[in-house]
Image (cartoon, rainbow, N blue to C red):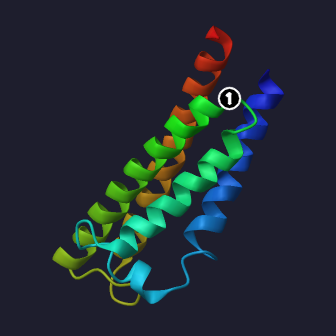
């Protein structure tokens, strides 16, 4: 079971990289995440939700659906909050070390989400 947990976490971390960087190449996605319910932010979060579903489908389809939806909602709000904080305090990559601290904290929160998902995946998986 420990190996399965580590594999699931690693797969979610790889999924996060793919969805957060290579698959977020369109400016309408990353430029508009500070506008609540803008299609760009929703699309980006939906890509994350679909990726989480794809990783967890091997455990249980019902849980994979719930976890994908959870990841989408949490990811959306983490990104929205970070983008609004950056705008409020005028944080940009080239003018503030606080931009990079915010970026790191954003990534930490996303990865904490995966720990929560995997924790509940194994509780759910072992209760069925």
Q: Image height check: is 19 above or below 25?
A: above
What secondary structure is found at the residue carrying circle 1?
loop
Q: Residue furthest left?
A: 88
- Mark 1 surroundings within 10 Å by alpha-carbon count, few (fewer than 14), some (14 through 19), many (20 or more): some
Residue at the image point whose x is 68% and y is 49% from the top:
54
Count of numbered circles in the view? 1
Q: Quadrant of the N terminus?
A: top right
Q: Does residue 62 sit above or below 78 in this rendering?
A: above
The answer to whether residue 42 is left or right of residue 14 is left
- Please state if 83 lies on the left or on the right of 63 as rendered: left
Q: Quadrant of residue 87?
A: bottom left
In this figure, which residue is indicated by the disc labeled 1?
60
User: Where 109 sits versus 31, above or below?
Assistant: above
Q: Is residue 21 visible?
A: yes
**What is the quadrant of residue 123 in the picture?**
top right
Judging depth in this view, the residue of 91 and 15 nearest the camera is 15
Q: x, y (%) of residue 56?
A: 67, 39
Q: Nearer the viewer, residue 107 or 56?
A: 56
The residue located at (30%, 71%) in the rendering is 83
Q: Residue at x 40, y 85 (%)?
A: 28
Q: Is residue 89 visible to us here?
A: no
Q: Is residue 17 left or right of residue 66?
A: right
At x 16%, y 75%, the residue is 88
Furthest toward the right, the residue is 3
| Image vertical order of residue 12 relative to residue 103, above or below | above
Front-most of 74 and 2? Answer: 74
């Amino acid at each position: 079971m420990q190996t399965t947990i580590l594999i699931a976490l690693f797969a979610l971390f790889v999924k996060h990289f793919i969805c957060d960087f290579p698959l977020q190449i369109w400016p309408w996605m990353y430029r508009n995440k500070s506008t609540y319910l803008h299609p760009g932010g929703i699309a980006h979060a939906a890509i994350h939700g679909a990726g989480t579903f794809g990783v967890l489908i091997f455990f249980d389809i019902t849980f994979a659906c719930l976890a994908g939806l959870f990841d989408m909602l949490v990811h959306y709000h983490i990104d929205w909050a970070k983008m609004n904080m950056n705008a409020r305090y005028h944080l940009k990559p080239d003018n503030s070390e606080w931009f990079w601290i915010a970026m790191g904290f954003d990534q930490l929160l996303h990865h904490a989400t995966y720990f929560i998902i995997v924790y509940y995946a194994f509780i759910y998986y072992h209760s069925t």
